[in-house]
């Protein structure tokens, strides 16, 4: 049976990188007594995959991993068991059954991600940045220089920037995510910096991921649905 | 979220910030206002090394069982953070509370190997605690050292207020109780140290006066007052089954060297190898009960979620209940995806059977530690492993499908000749020949024999404490001899040879048998920038040699000088249980190439029987029975 787990990552846990989070969850599954399945072979490993790695320094309200289990407790009890063995800064917020089969993997389904970006105290950009940001978003093309192994090439990120707006004290971005098209929030902010002719100090941004989505739309019409919505509560 | 000692800009700039944020699974946090004593436990090396150490986990658990104590941890900041802490004058902090170490009551530093000594100074320095014990005031923590190197703590005498000699489980409660009572009565630092000297196993270096002969050897060691004991009794746990053992070991976020549950099945070793400090120091050999170990294995795997459990001891095969324990672990944990690792096993039918069940034979290797190439030299060091046994074990392993063998040797052992060195190559070749005796269609390609040599360092409390140590050049010549001889062997293409760094070994030798005059050398080396000396990328021999010169320290006095029977050693004030008389007998027997039977065969009267426990106790009861 396939299970999708959604969790939050915050506080000091933002310094724990993706590979270490994978190891962390493997051990957490054992501590919580989740009946997780293993691969075949001489050194079996847990069947577990993450939707999308979160960079070091970023926090999130919407991280996902899929696991394969034999028997399972109810969603409520499984969440309680997991949350009892979590470190400060990780909280499981959803535990749902998803359809079997490779096609239902979070990693394969991932299409978009929401981010909230704040400026660290004392590192806000120069006054008037709000207007510049609105103008930046209103462009029909946003070319960035992407460094690849073969050299540099220009890339238009505008089609991958699904939504961008200012809210209270932060910037909200909805960006393409997944194996086909993936846009990092850092790259958008860098492009904005170039556009507005200002350089933000290093580590000026506090980036928080809000949610990960799949796209259920057809023929170019996007219909984003949070990954957890594909699962049913047990 | 608690406030971290380092801000984001620092943590995002340095390598592996997880080393410095604490918050690991099973880390203990307490309410400061309910605590009488704050103890900061330090392993003076990188986080990944320190977190892999069982001793710290045992003491961390033991201290935190007390309601009045909060024990936290600190490790050596890597050079990237070291630079930032100095530049920004940020005091070194403990991981759990992120509070400065200098605000603690105690700073306990474990001394696991000599080459961490400059890191000890780094810890003190970054903590903004005066390096010299005599310059510390009432506001500074009491700095206490422990661990195997504390059996000769003299090179560090100037930097520590106290040393704890022996196994930590026994006397810490008395020390902490004394501290609490003393402070409640408004007592000061000096008076506390004087009282502490009365606790068994506690050594206060400042309370002893050392005088020297004109040739540099020690003339006398005198306690400065009559209340201070002449001898400090090394502490030994008498019942290893009825004592503290961590039920909830710490689980780090990042990968550390020992990323698994560690089950210490016994302490000590019956074998009596004459070069081995651990084998002499942890006497008598004491086993833990099977039931206790089974229970601990369950609790620790449940509380950590680790996917591997490893047995720990100096010689696992000598644990009397090993077959039952191995069977139990395999039965209960193997199908839960838990790997079982059994290091330091003697290669025989039993161990090969167990290993074939828990490892992938094609990928794993079998290990022998003959330590010396020739039988003659193995008799000198009392390593009871014969060529016959090695070839038989290797043969059985080859028949069982293994094709990788690792061999460990030492170079520079007492009485060693060029012939002994060449025997290393010959033995490796014989093992390879044994492999190629197997018909081609039944064997698994070529065999891979890896020969590794380290250089021998004479250690205190061993029969070789009187021995001359080789010079750097002699060591390298010996490695060269082995290398050339291996290249001359028929199966040279199946043999790979690695040898150890000689410069570091020489320094290790200096500090292993050093006296308190070396504190100056150490301080100078640290001031010149020596740090992380056990890491090849940061070890700087040139700076060390300059420090010797500038402090007028004679390196060869500590290494190549062979000691006479009557010499007073810097560590003689420690009563380790094993008598100096026994060690000297063993030194004489070594030179006559006479072997000594192991403790299970017959008691040699080494002196550890005085502790009345373990293997010694079973001899006694056997006699009575």
Image (cartoon, rainbow, N blue to C red):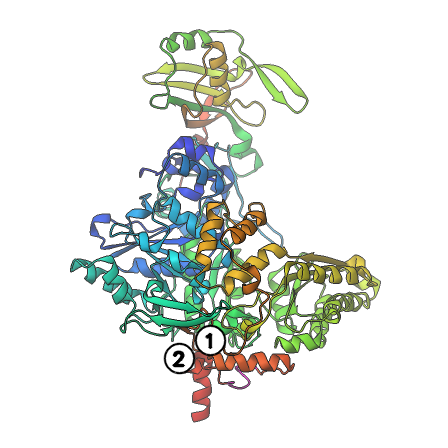
Q: Nearer the viewer, residue A207 or B523?
A: B523
Residue B501, percent from left and from top: 63, 55
- Magenta segment's dominant SS is loop
Residue A204 seen in render? yes
Q: What chain does badge 2 belong to?
A: B
Name the residue beneath numbered marker 1.
B283
Residue A31, percent from left and from top: 42, 52
- SS at circle 2: helix
Q: Specify the farthest residue to the left.
A: B185
Name the residue beneath numbered marker 2.
B611
Residue B256 left/right relative to B392 = left
Residue A61 seen in render? no
Query: Alpha-carbon distance for marks 2 and 1?
Result: 9 Å
Q: Do the residues under discs 2 and 1 have CB atoms within 8 angstroms? A: yes
Which quarter of the figure is the C terminus of chain B placed in? bottom left
Q: Nearer the viewer, residue B430 or B223?
A: B223
Q: For the magenta stretch, what is the residue range?
A: B598-604
Q: Is residue B356 magenta?
A: no
Q: Nearer the viewer, residue A12 or B175?
A: B175
Identify whether B218 is placed above or below A126.
below
């Amino acid at each position: 049976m396939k299970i999708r787990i959604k969790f939050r990552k915050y506080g000091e846990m933002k310094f724990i990188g993706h590979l270490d989070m994978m190891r962390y969850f493997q051990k957490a599954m054992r501590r919580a007594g989740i009946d997780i399945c293993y691969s075949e072979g001489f050194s079996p490993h847990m069947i577990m995959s993450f939707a999308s790695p979160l960079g070091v320094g970023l926090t999130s309200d919407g991280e996902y991993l899929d696991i394969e289990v034999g028997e399972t407790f109810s969603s409520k009890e499984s969440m309680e068991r997991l949350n009892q063995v979590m470190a400060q800064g990780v909280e499981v917020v959803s535990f749902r059954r998803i359809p079997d089969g490779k096609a239902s993997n979070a990693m394969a389904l991932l299409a978009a991600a929401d981010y909230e970006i704040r400026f660290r105290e004392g590192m806000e950009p120069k006054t008037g940045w709000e207007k510049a940001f609105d103008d930046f978003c209103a462009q029909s093309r946003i070319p960035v220089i992407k460094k690849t192994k073969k050299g540099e090439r220009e890339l238009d990120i505008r089609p991958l920037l699904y939504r961008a707006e200012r809210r209270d004290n932060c910037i909200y971005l909805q960006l393409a995510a997944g194996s086909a098209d993936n846009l990092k929030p850092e790259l958008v902010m860098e492009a904005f910096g170039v556009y507005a002719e200002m350089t933000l100090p290093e580590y000026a941004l506090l980036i928080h991921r809000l949610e990960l989505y799949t796209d259920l739309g057809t023929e170019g019409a996007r219909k984003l649905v949070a990954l957890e919505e594909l699962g049913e509560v047990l | 979220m608690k406030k971290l000692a380092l801000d984001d800009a620092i943590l995002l700039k340095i390598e592996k910030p997880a080393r410095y944020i604490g918050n690991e699974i099973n880390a203990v946090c307490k309410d400061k206002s309910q605590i009488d004593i704050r103890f900061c436990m330090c392993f003076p090396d990188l986080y990944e090394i320190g977190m892999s150490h069982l001793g710290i986990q045992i003491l961390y658990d033991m201290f935190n069982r007390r309601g009045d104590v909060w024990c936290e941890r600190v490790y050596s900041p890597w050079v990237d953070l070291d630079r930032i802490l100095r530049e920004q004058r940020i005091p070194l902090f403990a991981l759990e509370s992120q509070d400065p170490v200098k605000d603690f009551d105690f700073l306990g530093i474990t001394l696991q190997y000599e080459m961490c000594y400059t890191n000890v100074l780094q810890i003190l320095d970054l903590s903004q605690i005066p390096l010299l014990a005599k310059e510390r005031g009432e506001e500074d923590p009491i700095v206490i050292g422990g661990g195997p190197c504390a059996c000769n703590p003299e090179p560090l005498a100037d930097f520590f207020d106290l040393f704890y000699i022996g196994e930590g489980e026994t006397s810490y409660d008395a020390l902490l109780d004394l501290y609490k009572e003393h402070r409640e009565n408004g007592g000061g630092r000096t008076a506390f140290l004087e009282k502490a000297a009365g606790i068994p196993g506690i050594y206060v270096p400042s309370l002893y006066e050392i005088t020297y002969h004109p040739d540099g050897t020690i003339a006398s060691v005198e306690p400065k007052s009559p209340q201070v004991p002449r001898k400090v009794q090394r502490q030994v746990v008498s019942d290893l089954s009825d004592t503290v053992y961590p039920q909830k070991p710490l689980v780090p976020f990042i990968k550390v060297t020992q990323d698994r549950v560690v089950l210490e099945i016994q302490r000590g070793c019956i074998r009596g190898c004459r070069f081995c400090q651990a084998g002499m120091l942890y006497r008598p050999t004491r086993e833990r009960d099977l039931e206790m170990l089974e229970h601990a294995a369950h609790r620790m795997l449940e509380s950590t979620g680790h996917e591997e459990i490893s047995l720990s001891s100096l010689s696992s095969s000598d644990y009397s209940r090993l077959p039952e324990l191995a069977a139990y672990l395999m039965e209960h944990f193997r199908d839960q995806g838990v790997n079982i690792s059994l290091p330091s096993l003697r290669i025989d039918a039993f161990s090969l059977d167990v290993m074939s069940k828990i490892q992938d034979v094609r990928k794993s290797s079998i290990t022998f530690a003959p330590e010396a190439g020739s039988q003659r030299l193995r008799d000198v060091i009392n390593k009871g492993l014969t060529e016959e046994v090695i070839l038989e074990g290797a043969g059985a392993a080859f028949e069982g499908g293994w094709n990788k063998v690792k061999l460990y040797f030492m170079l520079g052992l007492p009485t060693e000749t060029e012939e002994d060195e060449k025997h290393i190559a010959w033995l490796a070749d014989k093992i390879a020949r044994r492999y190629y005796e197997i018909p081609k269609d039944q064997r698994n390609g070529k065999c891979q024999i890896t020969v590794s040599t380290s250089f021998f360092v004479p250690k205190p409390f061993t029969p070789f404490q009187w021995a001359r140590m080789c010079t750097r050049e002699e060591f390298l010549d010996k490695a060269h001899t082995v290398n050339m001889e291996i290249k001359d062997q028929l199966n040279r293409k199946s043999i790979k040879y690695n040898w150890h760094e000689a410069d570091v070994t020489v320094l290790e030798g200096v500090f292993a048998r050093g006296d308190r005059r070396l504190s100056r050398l150490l301080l100078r080396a640290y001031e010149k920038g020596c740090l992380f000396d056990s890491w090849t990328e940061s070890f700087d021999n040139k700076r060390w040699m300059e420090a010797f010169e500038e402090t007028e320290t004679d390196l060869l006095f500590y290494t190549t000088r062979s000691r006479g029977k009557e010499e007073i050693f810097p560590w003689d004030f420690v009563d380790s249980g094993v008598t100096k008389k026994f060690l000297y007998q063993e030194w004489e027997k070594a030179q006559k190439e006479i072997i000594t039977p192991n403790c299970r065969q017959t008691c040699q009267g080494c002196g550890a029987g005085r502790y009345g426990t373990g293997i010694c106790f079973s001899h006694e009861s056997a006699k009575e029975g």
